[in-house]
Amino acid sequence: MKQIRTYNNIADKGLSIFSKDRFEVSAAAEAPAAILLRSHKLHNETLPSSVLAIARAGAGVNNIPVSEYTPKGIVVFNTPGANANAVKELVLTSLLLGSRGVTQSMEYVKSLVSETDAAELNKKVEAGKKQYGGSELTGKTLGVVGLGAIGAKVANMAISLGMKVIGYDPALSVEAAWQLSSQVSRAENLNSLLARADYVTLHVPAIAPTIGMMNEDAFAAAKDGMVLVNLARGELVEEAAVINALDSGKVGAYLSDFPSEGLIAHGKATLFPHLGASTEEAEENCAIMAANQLIDFLDNGNIVNSVNFPAVSMERTSGYRLTFANDNVPKVLGTVLNLLADLNINVLDMVNKSRDNIAYTILDIEQEPTDQLIEKVAAVEHVFHVRRV
């Protein structure tokens, strides 16, 4: 029976995917084959040697030291798109809050709590509303930075609201492009998008090229009064730069899922306690996707939605399955195939894929892999992980 160790509260619909006759799912699993988590940080934590895979029920993997695990053959999964609708709806909420002064006007109404005269209260309400006149989204331009699963949904939603949409994503995939409305126009670079957009929403991961991307230079290039929405990662926006932009009026409002000490008290900042994917539906979708990916990997060696290994899947029909990971250099696959041939082991089917410096192979062979065969494959130069599935 395979053990699965869990961290955080994983939705029951996801945990129920693991059949009780084949999997033992527990936060106390001592020799887990896999780990299923949400936000728990694994940095500086020693994993049992039994761990083959980690699945994050969510998109970001900042809480997982991926580069440390890759050479150990540990496959790290995430669940892109499972929480996309939840984030999209919070983006819509943010756009409306940023255009109509809703939160500020609510605070104004609360300040009238001591008013006991109905006529005077009505007079103050009518007088106060004049300072919260906003603008409509229809006809305005939304800039979407990052057009993955979430960004594409946001772009299409804005089109349906009557907004003009500009998208910028230098790493736009063919699959993501198919999801986009043909009405979304393309910006050549970030500054081009910022100069034209009334509203900007960020949907990129926090990696070296994007951390601090919204800085003094970016705000200088932006359209005056731009409303900025950041439900992606706090590190994308330099705190001091956005505060200066808010103070000067260059940025009309900043709405973010990542509160920080310097922004909490700012009158033009509306901050949420990381609500983006915190819907019941999103948590269930993420847990179900993560569980299914782990099961397929543990049972079949298939890899779908990994952040550190290539996408590799092969239908299982007959024979016995062997998988191995290696440095992406020439001759490794050929050496393994020659080794099998020398042992008179027939290959029934195979698939080999690479991603950056990693290659991964699934082999279906006619004979059951012996311990001796596993040792021989593991001894091939540049092979760093072998598994009998």
Image (spheres, rainbow, N blue to C red):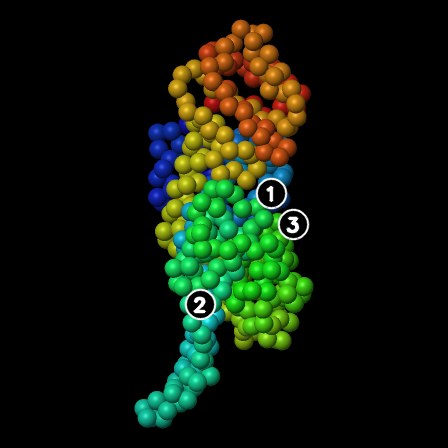
Residue 116 visible: no
Q: Residue at x 50, y 55 (%)?
A: 185
Of the residues tagged 3 and 2, which is closer to the observer? 2
Task: List x then y, in percent, for residue 198.
Answer: 52, 67
Say which quadrant the N terminus sits in: top left
Horizontal arrangement in the rendering, residue 24 relative to residue 35 (left or right):
left
Check disc 3: other Cα within 10 Å, few if <14, some if 14-19, many if 20+: few
Q: Residue at x 41, y 41 (%)?
A: 289
Numbered label tally:
3
Amino acid type at mark 2? Gly
Check disc 2: other Cα within 10 Å, few if <14, some if 14-19, many if 20+: few
**Mark 3 falls on what kind of element?**
loop
**Mark 2 falls on what kind of element?**
loop
Along the line of sight, the residue nearer the viewer: 189 or 73: 189
Q: Which residue is mark 2?
A: 139
- Checking the image for residue 208, the label placed there is 3
Of the residues tagged 3 and 1, which is closer to the observer? 3
Check disc 1: other Cα within 10 Å, few if <14, some if 14-19, many if 20+: some
- Checking the image for residue 227, the label placed there is none
Task: List x then y, in percent, for residue 97.
Answer: 45, 70
Task: List x then y, in percent, for residue 310.
Answer: 54, 33
Along the line of sight, the residue nearer the viewer: 41 or 315: 315
Mark 3 and mark 1 in contact? Answer it, CB < 8 Å.
no
Amino acid type at mark 3? Ala
Q: Residue at x 40, y 53 (%)?
A: 85
Of the residues tagged 2 and 1, which is closer to the observer? 2
Sequence-wise, which precedes: disc 3 or disc 2?
A: 2
Q: CA distance from mark 3 to mark 2?
A: 34 Å
Q: Which residue is mark 1?
A: 65
Can you say whether 312 is above or below 65 in the image? above
Sequence-wise, which precedes: disc 3 or disc 1?
A: 1
Mark 2 and mark 1 in contact? Answer it, CB < 8 Å.
no
